[in-house]
């Protein structure tokens, strides 16, 4: 499963079915950088085909209930776990420059998202200004006719 599909799966709820837009919003809340809803829709379709999620009704998705595997319960004798068998998972201390590098990358991604939003807003405002100018022109034309 791809990284994006894993993020989509993490955003799909277990209990109540959600629409694609809700799942996309949840992904953004969780910090995913996926901007296109069509990518989320494609991942949802592939997860549905794989049987990991279900489409409760048209456009509403929910996770598939996980059924316990009876073959896994009948495993042969389990060996007692000793202290030597469990590796200690200790993270080495992080380099301060690495931390700053990660933060800079996140800031750059956020800057890109802000720039994209500003461009979309500018296009929207420009389109609305053009519509307003056409409306005023139509009003003056109608006034001149009366």
Image (cartoon, grey):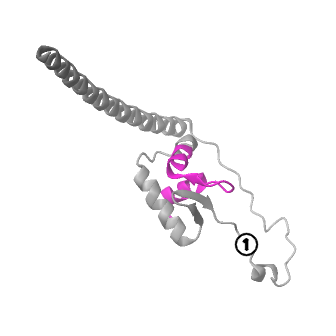
Tell me which residue sits at (30%, 26%) in the image: 125
Question: Is 18 contained in the magenta span?
Answer: yes
Q: Is residue 125 left or right of residue 143?
A: right
Q: Position of residue 43 (x, y in %)?
A: 47, 60
Q: Relative to residue 137, is residue 29 drawn left or right?
A: right
Q: Secondary structure at mark 1?
A: loop
**Quarter location, residue 9:** bottom right
User: The C terminus appears in which quarter of the rendering?
Assistant: top left
Left or right, residue 145 beside residue 53 = left
Is 87 magenta? The answer is: no
- Please tell me which residue is depicted at 64% across the width and 43% down the height of the picture: 93
Work out whether 73 lies above or below 1: below
Q: Is residue 20 above or below residue 110?
A: below
| Residue 3 drawn above or below residue 125 | below
Q: Residue 124 in the image: x percent, y percent?
A: 31, 31
Q: Position of residue 134 (x, y in %)?
A: 19, 25
Question: Residue 31 falls in which quadrant of the image?
Answer: top right
Q: Residues within 10 Å of mark 1 (few under 14, many from 20)?
A: few
Q: Which residues are magenta?
A: 1-26
Q: Which residue is mark 1?
A: 67
Q: Nearer the viewer, residue 93 or 34?
A: 34
The relative height of residue 53 versus residue 40 in the rendered view (above or below) is: below
The answer to which of 4 and 23 lies nearer the viewer is 23
* Residue at x 56%, y 61% (from the top left corner): 57
Front position in the image: 69 or 102? 69
Residue 47 position in % (x across, y down): 53, 65
């Amino acid at each position: 499963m791809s990284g994006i599909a894993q993020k989509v799966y993490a955003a799909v709820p277990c209990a109540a079915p959600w629409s694609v837009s809700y799942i996309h919003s949840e992904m953004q809340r969780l910090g995913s950088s996926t901007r296109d809803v069509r990518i989320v829709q494609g991942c949802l379709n592939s997860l549905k085909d794989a049987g990991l999620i279900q489409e409760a009704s048209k456009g509403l998705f929910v996770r598939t209930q996980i059924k316990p595997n009876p073959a896994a319960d009948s495993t042969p004798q389990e060996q007692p776990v000793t202290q030597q068998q469990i590796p200690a998972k200790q993270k080495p201390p992080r380099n301060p420059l690495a931390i700053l590098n990660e933060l800079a990358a996140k800031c750059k991604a956020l800057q890109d998202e802000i720039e994209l939003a500003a461009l979309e807003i500018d296009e929207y405002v420009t389109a609305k200004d053009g519509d307003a100018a056409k409306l005023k022109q139509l009003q003056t034309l109608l006034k001149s006719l009366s």
